[in-house]
Amino acid sequence: MTELFVLAEHRRGELRDVTFEMLTKGRELIARADVDLTAVLLGHNVKELAIRLADQVKKVLVVDDARLKDFNEVAYQKVLTHLISERKPVLILIGHTSFGIDLAPSLATKLNVPLATDCIDINFEEKKPIVVRQVYGGKVNIKASLRTSESYIVTLRPATIEAKEVKPIGGEIIEVASPLKEEPTTKRFIEYFEPPAGEVDITAADVLVSVGRGIKDADSMPIVEKLAEALGGAVACSRPIVDKGWLSADRQVGTSGKTVKPKLYLAVGISGAFQHVSGMKNSELVIAINRDAKAPIFRAADFGVVEDLFKVVPILTDRVLQEKKSSK
Amino acid sequence: MEIIVCVKHVPETAEAEIAIDSSGKGIKTEDLVFDINEWDDYAVEEAVLIKEKLGGRVTIVTVGSEDADKTLRKCLAKGADRAIRLTDKAFDGSDAYATAKILYGVIKDLPFDLILTGTQAGDDGYAQVGVILAGFLGIPHATMVKKIELMEGFTRVNRELEGGLEQVMEVGTPALLAVQTGINEPRYVSIMGIRKARQKELKVLGLNDLGLKEEEVGESGSWITVEEMFIPPVEKEAEILVGGLDAISSKIVETLRARGLI
Amino acid sequence: MEFELTEEQEDIKNAAREFAEKEFTAELGRKIDEKYEFPWMLYRKAAKLGFIGGSLPEEHGGQGLGCIEDCIVAEEFNRVDSTCAHLLSGIGFAALVPKFGTEEQNKKYVPRICKGEIVCAMALTEPNHGSDAGMVGLETTAVKDRNEWVINGAKTYITCGEEAEFVMVCCQTDPNAQPPYRGVSMIIVEKGTKGFDTNSLKPKLGFRGAPQAELSFDNVRIPLGNLLGQENRGFHQIMSYFDFSRIPIAAGAIGIAQGAYESSLKYSTQREQFFQPIANFQVTQFKIAEMATKIETARLLTYKAAWLVENKPEQRRLVTKISSMAKAYAAKISKEVTDEAIQIHGGVGYVDSDIERHYRDTRINDIIEGTGEIQKYIVARECYREIGFSV
């Protein structure tokens, strides 16, 4: 029987959420086909992770090798090329993460297997995968098919499918001998680097005033700082603000930054790209201020204000301060 | 240093109205402004910074129509030394895989120590071309690159991971590095740059020049075919507050008070 | 006939637009407007990119570009924010130096302007004389005393008069000349010279990023070598300079109109009244059509004038006529278009938007570098001259 591979993603001894999201999708896909769901785990001393995966899936292929301890595309690609050539899975699911982006195209090129990246959904129609992807910054979607092949590789965008766990099933763990011969020399993992943490931990704040590209100018930052201060909250931001160096990286909300769940998330001048939204969508209350009525942030917010932030924010700040004064 | 930078000329859609065209597989582009892909702008800046430090030459390569000259001239004005545009009717409908093949067609014969690309393009967002190209060229790559240090025979890069973490890797050179936004601060185009760009070479090559066959590129040479484009269904929509700045502010304050947030 | 920009001009347009869109924030415009401050920081940034001194000669650090390129930059800057665009006032009359100055004067001043280190000013208008300065004579006099000029008098409404590192002062050097303009000379007075004083003029309607000042000269002693151009030819120098310097002013006015038009267009599709966007009403549509037509007309005239300067400089009278038409017309329609933009925006336009600032800012365009009335006089004079009639 043919297989559907889910490449488990882990970092520093922990499985990443996207692994379970892919397993959920994989389970859904095999329910309608005669295919086995197989988790593929590459790493070193990953027994615990394998057991954890075997709770969720019938078969876990484990390749244990010291050279697979930390993600290295060259080593991963070699091992996966070997596994895929041997077992010919119909589909390989990989997370569209920093690891997946480095690995999937290289693997697909090596194997000459069609690849669709950053998919938000996947289905099989007449044994061929049909994927749904967002294009043009999420303003439109496409449905796309892949060239007919024995196998396909698809990377799934993290945090788009809700991971559902099944009751532990105690699946089989199959150890596969590592096919790696020598140490990969063209690419070496050196270390993890954590940008120095600032004084403020945005993941601990109840109230976040988060600022985006709409602020336009570093000199205008005080207006959001004042609002955050009035609300007794912290200032967070979206990616462009960190790219420009106006706030340190530890203030960034989103895929490449922090995931936050404050009681109030006030998005100021943030357009709401999915990378950002995935870091704040579980906030209890979201209020968005943006000049563009069509900004995607309004699809992630409870309340929206379609206005120039430079006008709204100072007035809102005053109103909050008044309210606090009068309630004292 | 011989540096090649692959760039893409893309429509700016962040603040534009998007409409699907009559084929149902693409968007209407007549009224959109096209410019260099945001990620590629950082790649060009990084290349020019390296050249300014170490000397050498920066070559820009793009696959696109004549309109892409705007982007190429911009790169030249920012300090790149020459540009190559790969244009052919046969290239229409190429996905990331076919595009990488086209780029390979010219780059395989060019000298290089480093190839830089953006990690992804803002239009289709595949994040594939650079890595596939590296695969064809048989050179190592790194994506999501936030920092580049060049050493003798290798480069040390910081790759951006999720959650604010970075991964430091050493990659043997020549290598292809796909950069992430924020790696530097792209410069503005200066009038001096525009004037200098007039003297620089901008070459156009087609299918035959690259020794490619028609079926290897375009839709037939692609992995992916777009079947349909559609506006995503709206799952949730914020309640838009109206009635002037004062009324809006009052409404927000009221909401916050009701939830005990003030 | 060609109506297209060259590739290089297209690139300059894109570069100016990108710079302005990223650097000229409305917030900054409001700040400048509030504080009456010359936008030094923007001026320096723009200079570094070659936007200052585009038409100044390359050997002195300029870009050696022409009037069309100056217009493109002026239009693009003003389109994004009329107040931030006041940075362009800092170079106002700098081109007089390469046009009439000595090698020494060029070396001393022009490179520093191109680098954005200094701004300069030109002083013609006096408390009692503006448009009539040439006909009735200037009250500011410069008298030779051995190897120095001794200047006495006052000037007013001098753009960047206080910020300027040097002012090119129009002085009556021959009080007996007839007509009096044949006795006017331009003399360079540097900031800090003894007896030279400035006083900033406030409040004013708009144009506040280009502060205006009154200047006073009390026995100011200046080396004879500071004469700019020829003695007693100062008025001619200024007038021939105005023929092309007023064209980028027209382009700036068009830029402001264009920006206001674009805001109105967008706003009219978002603002709903009677359950529909106001863009659905013909009354709005006609306003938009009028605005767009006026802008396009003014633009054609202005770029034609710029083209003439570049391509037919020998047809001096035609250049004078068309550039005056362009300046008068662009300034007029810019007032009308920004006015209509406020109307389309309604209360929002009057009270709480940047439109009102652009409306205030563009008003100066009908006054500086020759009022609309003087422009029309020039046009009429040239029209009558063509049939041999003198007015």
Image (cartoon, rainbow, N blue to C red):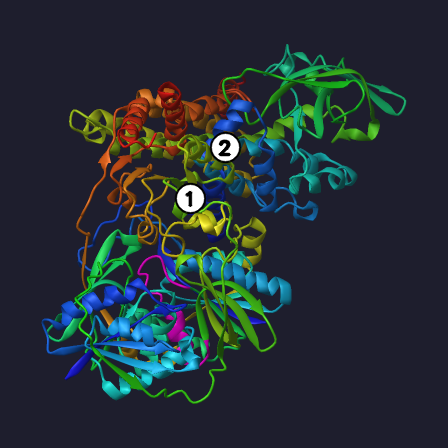
According to the image, label 2 marks what residue? Answer: C28
At horizontal 47% and vertical 51% (from top left) the residue drawn is A249
Residue A162, given in percent of the width and then of the height, sits at 21, 58
Q: Are marks 1 and 2 on the same chain?
A: no
Q: State which quadrant residue C336 falls in.
A: top left
Please state which amino acid type lies under the numbered disc 2: Leu
Residue B125 located within the stretch drawn in magenta: yes
| C-alpha separation, residue under disc 1 versus residue under disc 2 | 23 Å
Q: Is residue A242 visible?
A: yes
Residue B175, given in percent of the width and then of the height, sits at 49, 75
* Near-viewer residue (A316 or C10): A316
According to the image, label 1 marks what residue? Answer: A236
Please say if A87 is above or below B172.
below
Q: Which mark is residue A106?
A: none
Badge 1 marks a residue whose secondary structure is strand
Q: Nearer the viewer, mark 1 or mark 2?
A: 1
